[in-house]
Amino acid sequence: MAEKLLEINGVSKIFKIGGMIRGKKLVAIDHVSLSIDNDKPVILSVVGESGCGKSTLCKMVLRMYRPDTGDIFLLGKPYSQKKGYDPLQFRLDVQPIFQNPYESFSARKKVDTYLFNTALRLGIVKTRSEAEKLIDETLCNVGMSLATVRGKYPTQFSGGELQRVSIARALLTRPKLIVADEPVAAIDASMKMNIVNLFKELKDKYKVSFIYITHDLSTAYYVSDYIATLYRGCLIEYGPAKEIMDHPAHPYTDLLMNAVPRVGEKWDNSVVLPDMEENEYAISYCKYAPRCPYAKDKCRKWRPELKPTTGDRQVACFYPLTEKSRDHS
């Protein structure tokens, strides 16, 4: 069996909310398993409404949170073992891009300082002249240059420009995986597709895979090779992006897809996404059952497992949607 680039194996993350006495446990990520192959770079989008666990999963992949159960493997090496993945090598192989680029840079430090520190302190190059060449080349690949960045502070850039610098800094290490957590959420609409287009171009140019965390389904549809849908911390559907977006098998994914306006279609239907309720995270049966129009007694007694359907698709539903059931809904 070919080695996986990333393998998330049954991970869970539990937070305690409230006071010491009356506090509750919130299962933010509930036994999630996902993997990315190492033979071909891909963009895997993790989608779902706010509070579904996307960013928590992202932080576990970045080793910012430690899973309470399960483990994560990078190129076959486990996160959990001290002798697993070397910390320096991890910083070279896995890079983050965060939501707000202005929070990624200090307003008191020049932006090019971050780029030189990354190139020199991580041992990517040995001399400053080599660093200049590498930084300029990388910035050019994201539509900028060292000349336009040198000596400037973060506040002298637009959000879209600064996010491009963030992408360039991530690319300096020639990573195998970039984890982008809502990278276009804080950027104006005119720049969103420019950033998303960059991901598609850089995936092939740098042979780097992306985990794209987003609630923006229109960009997910455009950029993704695969999509994973989260609901209340559970992975409920996974598969090739076009198949899932065009023919969702889980009722919740279907609801999300119907919430995306499409060109040439009048948006007549009222689509209401459920409010986040703490109690739903503790449900032992299907977490979507209280809101699902197709739920039956079985759904209110048992938790469906994520099972293969057709091709590379998987769905956690006792009664997956078909074209016929969709037409009669």
Image (spheres, helix red, strand yellow):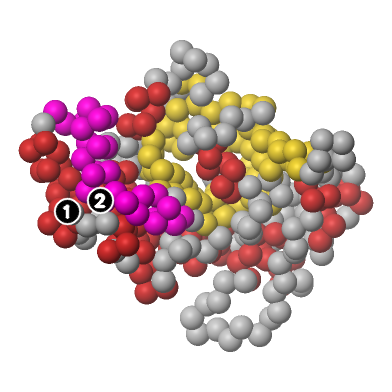
User: Is residue 2 among the parts visible in the rendering?
Assistant: no
- Residue 130, placed above or below residue 310: above
Residue position for label 2: 110
Give the residue at x 41% y 71%: 188
* SS under mark 1: loop
Q: Is residue 74 left or right of residue 117?
A: right
Q: Is residue 167 left or right of residue 213?
A: left
Disc 2/disc 1 C-alpha distance (Å)? 8 Å
Indicate yes or no whether the magenta region holds residue 102: yes
Which residues make up the magenta segment?
A: 99-126
Count residues near mark 2 (Cα–Cα under 10 Å), then give few for <14, some for 14-19, many for 20+: some
Which mark's residue is nearer the viewer, 2 or 1? 2
Image quadrant of residue 196? bottom left
Image quadrant of residue 206? top left
Name the spot of residue 66 as percent of width and height, x first: 59, 29
* SS under mark 2: loop
Q: Are marks 2 and 1 in contact (CB under 8 Å)?
A: yes
Residue position for label 1: 150
Name the spot of residue 227 as percent of width and height, x first: 53, 52
Q: Is residue 266 left or right of residue 172?
A: right
User: Toward the viewer: 180 or 105?
Assistant: 105
Q: Is residue 205 left or right of residue 313?
A: left
